[in-house]
Image: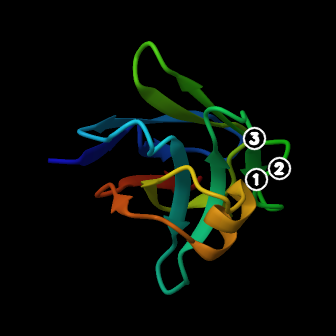
Amino acid sequence: QVQLVESGGGSVQPGESLRLSCAPSGLTSEYDRIGWFRQAPGKVREGVSCIGDGDGNTYYADSVKGRFTISRDNAKNTVYLQMDNLNPEDTAEYYCAAAPHTSFTIETMCVMEYGIRYWGKGALVTVSS
């Protein structure tokens, strides 16, 4: 059974940081692409950041470039999303998702949710003063 478990969400003040973790289990080796997506109340879900494994490519939405960093620790089988300088517009439910390594790009995975097969249940991030 495949599971993607997010952790690290919480409530912070503007300018503070959080680190989200995604720990997949049950995935076959072909599912080496992991992405972070978020959905704010009343808004459409958007791709925040995605990462490949073999190619090391990453993608960031313009709204988080320079503030968020995606990384993976293969020894721990965990993908992280370091979120710095958070602002109220970052308030959302954050979801981890997995896609297989195929010919589509990391950007396609993030922007179009292309190829995603598995989703986590989400972690809530609230940024307010």
**Residue that lies at the very extreme toward the top in this rendered image:** 75
Q: Which residue is mark 3?
A: 57
Q: Is residue 81 left or right of residue 2?
A: right
Q: Nearer the viewer, residue 76 or 115?
A: 115
Residue shown at the point (33%, 40%) measured from the top left: 28
Residue shown at the point (69%, 67%) measured from the top left: 108
List x then y, in percent, for residue 33.
54, 46
For residue 65, which numbered disc appears in the image? 2
Q: Residues within 10 Å of mark 1 (few under 14, many from 20)?
A: many
List x then y, in percent, for residue 83.
64, 39
| Secondary structure of residue under mark 1 | strand
**Residue that lies at the very extreme toward the left in this rendered image:** 1
List x then y, in percent, for residue 17.
62, 34
Tag nearer the camera, 2 or 3: 3
Gap between marks 1 and 3 measured at Cα: 10 Å
Q: Is residue 7 depicted above or below 103 in this figure? A: above
Q: Is residue 54 depicted above or below 67 in this figure? A: above
Q: Which residue is mark 1?
A: 60
| Secondary structure of residue under mark 3 | loop
The reply to whether callout 1 and callout 2 are in contact (CB within 8 Å) is yes
| Secondary structure of residue under mark 2 | loop
Q: Is residue 64 depicted above or below 68 in this figure? A: below
Q: Residues within 10 Å of mark 3 (few under 14, many from 20)?
A: few
Q: Earlier in the sequence, mark 1 or mark 2?
A: 1
Instruction: Say what amino acid the circle numbered 2 marks.
Output: Lys
Q: Earlier in the sequence, mark 2 or mark 3?
A: 3
Gap between marks 1 and 2 measured at Cα: 6 Å
Tag nearer the camera, 1 or 2: 1
Gap between marks 2 and 3 measured at Cα: 15 Å
